[in-house]
Amino acid sequence: MLKPERPYFSSGPCAKRPGFSLAALEGALLGRSHRAAAPKAKLREVIERSRALLGMPADWRLGIVPASDTGAVEMALWSLLGPRGVDALVWESFSAEWAADLAEQLRLPDLRVLKAPYGRLPDLSAVDWGRDVVFVWNGTTSGVRLPDGGWIAPDREGLAICDATSAAFAMALPWERLDVVTWSWQKVLGGEAAHGMLALSPRAVARLEAHRPAWPLPKIFRLTRGGRLIEGIFQGETINTPSLLCVEDALDGLRWAESLGGLPALIARAEGNLALVAEWVARSDWAAFLAEDPATRSCTSVCLRFKALATGRQAEVARRMTAFLEREGVALDAAHYRDAPPGLRLWCGATVEREDVARLLPWLDAAYAEALRG
């Protein structure tokens, strides 16, 4: 069997773009202050290219923030929440962490957690749009995504706060129905870690300027000064020191995406990879998607479960399979997330080549057979 040329199927940090080499980073402004004119222009370029590629409305703000997507989400939660009750949607690990922070750290007095087990979505019709709503677009650890934004009220009173880290650049986001969107460089475009992106609608900005949180805000979370938005954050003046090497890498990924044809091409690549896996799953006698509804299957973090294997054997078989795949050099970092049901998790985002997915699939059958023998 042929092996994938690039066996990189990690769900974060994710595969670099095809053809990447360190030569792509030769333009990095190393040894420079990020506040100097030329480095600051590079940071602004990341912002503007990202805005254009995603089709973000002109009146939204977009900034680079510290601590990856986690930092961007926490900044939004700590800075915006409090004036209204909050509905938190939970169906996988990271959404559960956001809900836990709201309950245990911010200690919101009016918090509802709408929860579903791995493989399903919560009852979206139960969401109250008179409240602020916190949710992920794509469950990175469950492989379950929202099929569309039709469940989000266009005339909502509360804010729609969306963690889109494994969705941005691979799925269509309905900007008109969102108010806060976050992601990181290390997902769909294969950038390096530690930097997050925070996008704010005019409604979110109005909340920031009108609301003073009841809890102390660390400097790293502060988005306003004197009741006004710190506009510099959204013009390349980052709160803490960014890596200009990572900035150059982010620009390389954005330029690559543009060269393909932009967002439609990125979506097509990810959806094409998912379609290959779906064809294989339909023929498999042992593998199934963790996502129960085909409309909710992620095209980035594709999570597989065992069809009929005894529960007591699943974790060990999954461990043996991932060890086999790594030993053979055909799929690195393909283990299920530690809190998820045992199985495999394959990143199939836009930087993963279709041919590599096609070559991997027969190896999954070989890995399963080998794991059973073990």
Image (cartoon, rainbow, N blue to C red):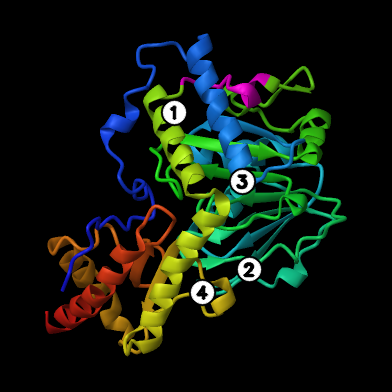
Residue 51 is left or right of residue 318, and the answer is right
- Amino acid carrying label 1: it is Val
Query: Label 3 to label 1, Cα distance in Å?
Result: 18 Å
- Amino acid carrying label 3: it is Leu
The residue under the point 75% across, 66% down is 151
The label nearer to you, 2 versus 4, is 2
Disc 1 to disc 2: CB gap under 8 Å: no
- Amino acid carrying label 4: it is Gly
Secondary structure of the residue carrying tag 2 is: loop
Label located before the other in sequence (1 or 2) = 2
Label located before the other in sequence (1 or 4) = 4
Query: Label 3 to label 4, Cα distance in Å?
Result: 28 Å
Residues 266 and 195: in front is: 266
Label located before the other in sequence (3 or 1) = 3
Label located before the other in sequence (2 or 3) = 3
Q: Which residue is mark 3?
A: 54
**Residue 96 appears in which quarter of the rendering?**
bottom right
Q: Mark 1: give few (<14), some (14-19) or many (20+) Cα within 10 Å.
A: many
Q: Mark 4: give few (<14), some (14-19) or many (20+) Cα within 10 Å.
A: many
**Residue 332 appears in which quarter of the rendering?**
bottom left
Q: Is residue 233 visible?
A: yes
**Residue 172 appears in which quarter of the rendering?**
bottom right
Residue 287 locus on image (x, y percent): 35, 82
